[in-house]
Image (cartoon, rainbow, N blue to C red):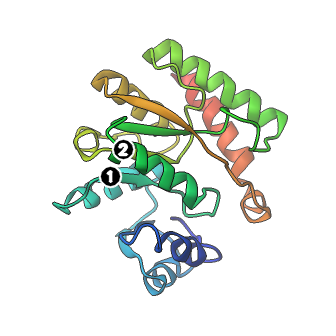
């Protein structure tokens, strides 16, 4: 989380009934997000400065793996865009033995409402990812993911910012785990739009594809 004091408490409270072990990686917030997350019931691991999504994911994965009883790891955005029911369904596919990695996709059905620009950028990113890694993903930049611990132990993200998504897919392609995509809904709220996340992420994804 990074300056998500407005929403992170409700996100955590929504998760806890299904996921009692919620870890928030605070990426240098200055708005009191850490206090709110702890009061809501999460464990908070803090970066002293803002390092970016890739660094936060790596920290969270490593912290989760320190629990010897961990049986699945979910990455879940702090801004309210993901749904608990989607994460629960994805974990069930790990626990059933169907897959070692379950990746959320907003393109397996028509429930997620996207701007034309965002849709084009994400489609292009998925095609680029397919050509560069061989993984036939429909949504290469979806933050809702679930990993078996054996796969998570082999993830070592070095790209701190948006390029981490491409790096993660490449590492999974190299591992060749059993993977599936799960249809999920991304909820673009007035809150997330007010922060400019949709447009900013589109620009960052284009920049990542260009420089790669």
Report the residue that reaches farthest toward the front: 96
Tell which circle, 1 or 2, labels the residue nearer the N-terminal end. 1
Which residue position is annotated with label 2? 94
The x, y position of residue 204, in whole percent, is 62, 38
User: In the figure, 204 relative to 62: above or below?
Assistant: above
Label 1 close to label 2 by CB (< 8 Å): yes
Quarter of image, res 63: bottom left
Which residue is located at x 53 percent, y 76 percent? 30
Decide: is 168 above or below 175.
below
Q: Which quadrant holds residue 60? A: bottom left
Q: Is residue 160 visible?
A: no
User: Residue 172: x and y, percent?
Assistant: 35, 29
Closest to the observer: 93 or 77?
A: 93
Report the disc number at residue 19: none
Which residue shows up at 45% across the image and 14% down it?
Answer: 134
Q: Badge 2: how crowded within 10 Å, few (<14), some, or many (20+)?
A: many
Q: Is residue 201 left or right of residue 142?
A: right
Q: Which residue is mark 1?
A: 72
Measured Cα–Cα span from mark 1 to mark 2: 7 Å
Residue at screen point 82% across, 40% down: 115
User: Observer-nearest residue: 6 or 49?
Assistant: 6
The crowding category of the residue bearing disc 1, from other C-alpha atoms within 10 Å (few below 14, some 14 to 19, many at least 20), is many
């Amino acid at each position: 989380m990074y300056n998500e004091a407005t929403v992170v408490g409700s996100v955590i409270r929504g998760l806890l009934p299904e996921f009692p072990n919620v870890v928030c990686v605070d990426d240098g917030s200055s708005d009191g997000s850490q206090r709110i997350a702890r009061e809501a019931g999460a464990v908070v691991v803090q970066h002293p400065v803002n390092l970016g999504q890739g660094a936060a994911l790596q920290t969270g994965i490593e912290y989760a793996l320190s629990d010897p009883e961990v049986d699945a790891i979910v990455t879940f955005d702090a801004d309210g865009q993901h749904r608990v029911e989607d994460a629960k369904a994805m974990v069930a596919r790990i626990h059933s033995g169907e897959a070692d990695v379950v990746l959320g996709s907003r393109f397996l059905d028509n429930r997620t409402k996207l701007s034309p620009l965002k849709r084009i950028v994400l489609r292009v990113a998925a095609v680029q990812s397919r050509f560069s890694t061989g993984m036939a993903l429909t949504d290469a930049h979806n933050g809702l993911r679930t990993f078996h611990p054996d796969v998570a132990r082999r993830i070592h993200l070095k790209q701190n910012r948006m390029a981490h998504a491409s790096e993660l897919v490449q590492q999974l392609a190299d591992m060749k785990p059993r993977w599936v995509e799960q249809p999920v809904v991304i909820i673009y709220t007035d809150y997330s739009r007010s922060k400019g996340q949709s447009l900013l992420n589109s620009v960052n994804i284009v920049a990542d594809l260009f420089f790669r």
